[in-house]
Image: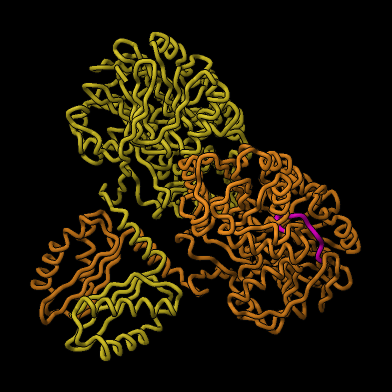
Chain colours: A yellow, B orange
């Protein structure tokens, strides 16, 4: 390849949903797009999250990061990045800036930033980047048009979007700028969202939900509860306006909802003022018509929704006549948690209303018909699906190949660099770095240690200590059936017998190992599994 | 209530899906329907299952159990029941008998049984029970018509069914017998499946899948893989016949598939003979056209599907050109496991085909249109939704009330006894007994112990021992980040300092407690959480 103009190198978000992070590399500098978190497949009770590995980043070359929007899978690892690269300039829009600053303040991390406007051309050493407005499920989402200085190459990078041409909340996706900017380029490539490609149709517009939401807000019951993704500020704003119009007091339960509403107010995305909103304890014991927003539509452990549903909230407990509206979908993996909430609410006599009953949720990602609208606006020479599980990327590529055979389509994975050269692209492999697992005080925890924890969760633990001089033994079990504790004296007897006949003269390591083996064998005969066992010897 | 004819008392399966078990109670005896297992909501890595509590069962009154069909949520706890009540007579059909015997033999449990035929009237002391054939996703599924001797009352109990009027595999649901037997009764009640009531339409017939399955079997690729619920013998039989007709060798991977096919052969539900089926190692290295059945469509840890998809099977590894067909749905809670399999297969270059792409899966449960067909055949006086989560039961009742206001509809939960008296029903509460958690060698494990395990999984464990005479301390951590292990010397130093200044003269309990508190505090400062901590003192 003679000339390389720039390249696109995803280090997260391709073949998985989450931890989105991509490098735009050119001769003199690397620009980062987004820095998100991911929840692991092999769960450990929701306590961990994953962040991309940063070892490919070189502080001498990486000076800028552009944030496309404020979802956690795009900003959730930014604090970790800024700790490692404190001099980065973060390019961001006002709403997203508010969200990021709020999080960074909690962790006492400072940040250099620049606010960008959609349509504004950001000029870097070898490329110009034009953020373009796209529709999604959070305000201020951008796609990025990256172009070489000589316009030999132009790439459109949209990790999250849908086409919402008639939204009342925001402008439609800016097809005009996309077409205009890319038409100026000799060669073009698309890097496009695959999340919803399985869906054949056109993704529902936010507007289409209004009829059913309004119908629900006008129900006669005094207490309506509603849960939704906290970041869907446009929907929350629309619902709050409807509730206000129908004479309801608006109550907001859950910190995340307050945060997003505050960000929305400060950046002009809502007409709802602080005076319109009440905290739960401000209206405790009041009757009259209310709409109560609940955070935690995925059933998260400490959320307002879960607390309320389980009857554990101090201000509101479910009672017959309550209506609880789920203006959301179930993210795969959360089904059981959410069904449990449905059950609890029903058992308290509350009625639940979901997107099965009414048109009250719309995806933020493109179905096949949305993709067609994008491609009919402007057809690139090359097409690379991103932002999706492996099988979605493949389905996405198959769809494009079938419908647009003139476009050259490539399926890549994380750590494959797409190099844009003269009239062609080249895909180059980098060694794959596994994402890092974070737990507790933003600390990394190794996979081997998680595997130890999993063993204790599935098999319990046994602690044995033995004092050789006085011949005394103590045994503690954690997480074993009570019947196993009743057998503990038998275990001790066996181990002491073994010590007397076999071990008394042996060295410490052998002694400890044998006690461990015998104890695990004992419990395996009794229970059918071998607990994690640790031995101390004196 | 003057006269009580009999009552229906569910002790599992109502307000949850799984562990189905119901008592039919009358003056002189109690008859049991089914005895199934349930997987818990709060998971512990898939190692546990729940069984109903048997303490309401009285050996003097309980002599008979009738099994409606062979799914695990109906037979999975039978072994536990027979251990406690070895003299029970188990009423069963041939296919289900084969499945049960196979399981009991493994656990060396014997069983008295009687084989029943659909339509046959089983006469007990106070009631007659007529099993009627219904359609479902496993052969030989029955509903039960329970009638008092004087025909004052008749109840139809169908925990699992769909209406498949044109099945090529089996007779349609026996509406005639239902109508005839219940018409003879003065009062009638329905106890009906709620699993799929959220679905407005008519559940797809197995036949409707054949066109797409046949299309897939005729694809040009040599290696087709297919996974499905092993118990769906009719579908497996249909697919095998198609594959045979298209000149494919049929390979079966996974024990459960062999078991069900054997049961199907012995009870006349398949034309596929043992000679038609090959084990994976019989065809290892062969080329030519094949259809390979894989067990484990839910991504189960040790299944053939998972082993194959991860490239860990000795006989078959995924290669580009392979087609892997999922003739199944994702059971809620298994999404992440299955998406991971989709990804792995795609990364190996295999193509995956799911029910999103073709009509290749049908539910075994009734949508609203199925329920209408049942109710249009015969309308009872009373209606009680069963077999479903709480919110499904409520939606089910709302549907019946809206469409059949003349029927009296009651939502109950487990341990509510529905007493059928003269012209009325009465619901009586019994103290709710929590299901029992089983782990390892079919042993019960207490919830408190599972909670200990969860703590170790989320926070790790620390084991401390201290020898007062020699002043020596040992500390072992399990499942803590490696950086925490580096700080262990500091912890020891702190604890020893505390011992010298504070603890040396204190009693053992206080001493141990203080060490525990200090250690947990130390790790909380370091990591942000407190590990489970045990202390031994000498």
| The C terminus of chain B: image quadrant | bottom left
Q: Is residue B11 above or below residue A210?
A: below
Give residue A437's position: percent from left, percent from top: 31, 48
Q: Which of A327 and B158 is in front in this view?
A: B158
Foreground of the two, B109 or A233: B109
Residue name at image x 23 percent, y 21 percent: A27
Query: Which quadrant would the N terminus of chain B be assigned to in this image?
Result: bottom right
Is residue B411 among what the camera can see? Answer: no
Give residue A445's position: percent from left, percent from top.
Answer: 28, 52
**Which region is colored magenta?**
B131-138
**Quadrant location of residue B11?**
bottom right
Identity of the residue drawn at 75% across and 79% down: B29
Q: Does the magenta stretch include residue B65?
A: no
Residue A326 falls in which quadrant of the image? top right
**Residue sitting at 26 percent across and 91 percent down?**
A500
Front-most of residues B23 and A443 = A443
Q: Which image quadrant for residue A279?
A: top left
**Where residue A330 sits: x, y (%)?**
52, 43
Q: Is residue A175 left or right of residue B185?
A: left
Q: In this view, does A465 lie above or below A225?
A: below
Q: Residue at x 78, y 57 (%)?
A: B134
Above or below, B216 against A376 in this view is below
The location of residue B422, given as percent across then percent down, is 83, 67
């Amino acid at each position: 390849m003679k000339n390389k103009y720039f390249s696109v190198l995803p280090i997260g978000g391709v073949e998985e949903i989450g931890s989105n992070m991509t490098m735009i590399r050119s001769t003199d500098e690397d620009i980062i797009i987004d820095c998100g978190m991911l929840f692991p497949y092999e769960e450990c009770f929701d306590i961990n999250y994953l962040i991309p590995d940063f070892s490919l980043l070189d502080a001498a070359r990486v000076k800028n990061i552009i944030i496309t929007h404020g979802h956690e899978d795009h900003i959730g690892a930014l604090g970790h990045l800024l700790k490692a690269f404190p001099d980065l300039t973060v390019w961001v829009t006002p709403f997203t800036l508010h969200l990021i600053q709020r999080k960074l303040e909690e962790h006492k991390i400072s940040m250099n930033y620049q606010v960008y406007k959609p349509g504004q051309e950001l000029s870097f050493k070898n490329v110009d980047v034009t953020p373009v407005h796209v529709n999604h499920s959070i305000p201020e989402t951008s796609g990025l048009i990256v172009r070489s200085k000589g316009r030999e190459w132009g790439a459109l990078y949209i990790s999250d979007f849908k086409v919402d041409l008639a939204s009342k909340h925001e402008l439609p996706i800016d097809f005009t700028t996309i077409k205009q900017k890319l038409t100026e380029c000799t060669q073009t490539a698309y890097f496009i969202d695959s999340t919803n490609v399985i869906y054949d149709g056109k993704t529902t517009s936010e507007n289409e939900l209004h009829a059913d939401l309004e119908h629900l807000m006008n129900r006669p019951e005094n207490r309506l509860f509603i849960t939704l993704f906290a970041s869907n500020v446009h929907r929350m704003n629309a619902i709050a306006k409807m509730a206000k119009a129908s004479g309801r007091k608006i109550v907001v339960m859950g910190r995340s909802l307050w945060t997003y509403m505050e960000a929305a107010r400060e950046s002009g995305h809502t007409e709802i003022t602080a005076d319109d909103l009440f905290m739960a304890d401000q209206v405790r014991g009041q009757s009259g018509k209310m709409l109560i927003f609940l955070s935690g539509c995925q059933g998260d452990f400490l959320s307002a929704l879960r607390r309320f549903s389980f009857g554990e909230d101090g201000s509101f407990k479910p009672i017959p006549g309550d209506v609880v509206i789920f203006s959301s979908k179930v993210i795969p993996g959360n089904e059981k948690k959410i069904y449990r909430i449905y059950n609890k609410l029903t058992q308290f006599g509350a009625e639940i209303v979901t997107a099965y009953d009414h048109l009250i949720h719309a995806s933020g990602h493109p179905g096949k018909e949305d993709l067609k609208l994008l491609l009919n606006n402007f057809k690139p020479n090359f097409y690379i699906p991103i932002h999706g599980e492996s099988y979605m990327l493949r389905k996405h590529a198959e769809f494009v190949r079938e419908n647009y055979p003139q476009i050259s389509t490539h399926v890549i994975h994380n750590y494959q660099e797409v190099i844009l050269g003269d009239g062609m692209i080249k895909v180059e492999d980098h060694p794959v770095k596994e994402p890092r697992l974070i737990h507790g005080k933003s600390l990394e925890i190794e996979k081997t240690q998680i595997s130890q924890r999993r063993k204790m969760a599935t098999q319990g633990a046994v602690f044995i200590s033995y004092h050789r001089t006085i011949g005394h033994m103590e045994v503690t079990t954690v997480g074993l059936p009570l019947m196993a504790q009743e057998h503990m004296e038998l275990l001790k007897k066996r181990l002491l017998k073994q010590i007397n006949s076999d071990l008394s003269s042996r060295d410490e390591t052998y002694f400890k190992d044998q006690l461990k083996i015998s104890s695990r064998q004992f419990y395996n005969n009794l229970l059918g599994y071998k607990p994690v066992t640790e031995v101390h010897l004196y």
